[in-house]
Image (cartoon, rainbow, N blue to C red):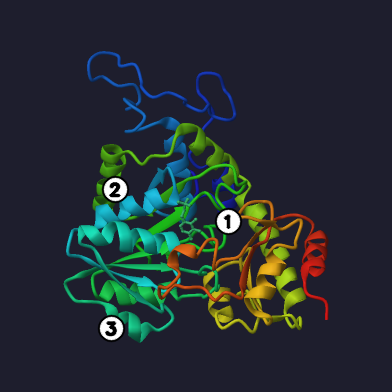
Amino acid sequence: MARKQHFDTAAIHAGQEFDPRTGAVIPPVYLTSTFVQKSIGELRGGYEYTRGGNPTRDSLQTLIAALEGGKHGLSFASGLAAEDTLLRAALSPGDHIVMGNDVYGGTHRLIERVHGPWGIRNTVVDMGDLRAVEKAIIPGETKLLWLETPSNPMMKISDIAELAEIGHRAGLIVVVDNTFASPALQRPLVHGADVVVHSTTKYLGGHSDVLGGALVINDDELAEKAKFLQFAAGPVSAPLDAWLTVRGIKTLSVRMERHCSNALAIARHLDGHPAIDTVYYPGLPGHPGHALAAQQMSGFGGMLSLAFAGGAKAARKFAESTRLFQLAESLGGVESLMNYPAEMTHASVRGTELEVPDNIVRLSVGIEDVADLIADLDRALPKK
Ligand SMILES: *Cc1c(COP(=O)(O)O)cnc(C)c1O
């Protein structure tokens, strides 16, 4: 047996054998909906119809499972399609979910407004308050614990190992949305989580050119249920989307290094600026989750948020004044993006416990030259 590959090697090679027919180093994109059978029911390599299986999707699924250190990888048309599949695979009407009060707004919307009417109840808690998490668990009814760390947009850090222990004591499935960190910086399964969820649209794809989602599951039975739904309900990733995601993942490690160093430089530069009350970045020693992040992650990530002293007016003006940082939703691409959560990414959670203060601006720091990024931010900051 070959020895287990290190992360950076697996990111390039896991599931990526060259094409045996031609020797093409990069396996072709299998842009096909169906596969010719040798005789009735006799398949070539197990492939029958692309909703059920496609070699390009398989290569992405193998790759993501390897990067998260998990057994089964499944890829989907979007992060929310992955989440929806997991919820339906893991839960039945009457079941209850405990989730963080800082989960992705779309996750909250999916659980509350799509699964709620089908009989799934939820309680929202602060994942930093372990007593509150324990109290929110209803014995026999709660089936799933859902957390996200670092969180969006306040960059709160939750203790995956502690929460997994609490969840497992109550027999729950512990799910971590690992979109913000990516497996290059954090591997939740190693810390005891049962399932990892990704919006591969963000850092894994990395180039803001493709939508996608993934699940990595260790439990065979749960993985089988999710696989069945992938086939029976059809929320799969298309071959070209899967191929673009694989292509993005090859550079994940080097991109994350630059995302991290740029974000840290910007956080340090803005920390203490008179126009800014707080810089939310786990890499700053003053961040409440700094020590935990240093232990749980191998880098602090490329996302940071700013609270403006001048309130909503100052935050909005800043968000609309940068040039390199472009005003757009989403994150994790090579280019820097600026977001005003209260009215953009988090508009769907206004009036809920997940509401984001209106003086917050979120930056997705790209991999451009950091001096240019800092100059862009400085130009947009209020002059004293
Ligand atoms: C974007 C995002 C999602 C949803 O993924 P889509 O690909 O947009 O469906 C889920 N979780 C987090 C943390 C995200 O940032």
Residue 360's place in the image compared with 82, above or below, is below
Residue 135: assigned label: 3
In space, the residues marked 1 and 3 are separated at their CA atoms by 35 Å
The residue positioned 66% from the left and 53% from the top of the image is 255
Q: Which residue is mark 1?
A: 329
Can the viewer see residue 16 in this picture?
Answer: no
Residue 320's place in the image compared with 100, above or below, is above
Q: Which residue is mark 2?
A: 226
Secondary element under disc 1, as helix, strand or loop, is loop
Residue 377 placement, left or right of 120: right
Marked residue nearer the N-terminal end (1 or 3): 3
Q: Residue extending furthest top?
A: 39
CB atoms of marks 2 and 3 within 8 Å: no
Marked residue nearer the N-terminal end (1 or 2): 2
Secondary element under disc 3, as helix, strand or loop, is helix
Q: Position of residue 220 (x, y in %)?
A: 27, 51
Residue 54 placement, left or right of 37: right
Q: Position of residue 345 (x, y in %)?
A: 52, 61
What type is the residue that disc 1 sits on? Glu
What type is the residue that disc 3 sits on? Lys
Residue 239's place in the image compared with 73, above or below, is above
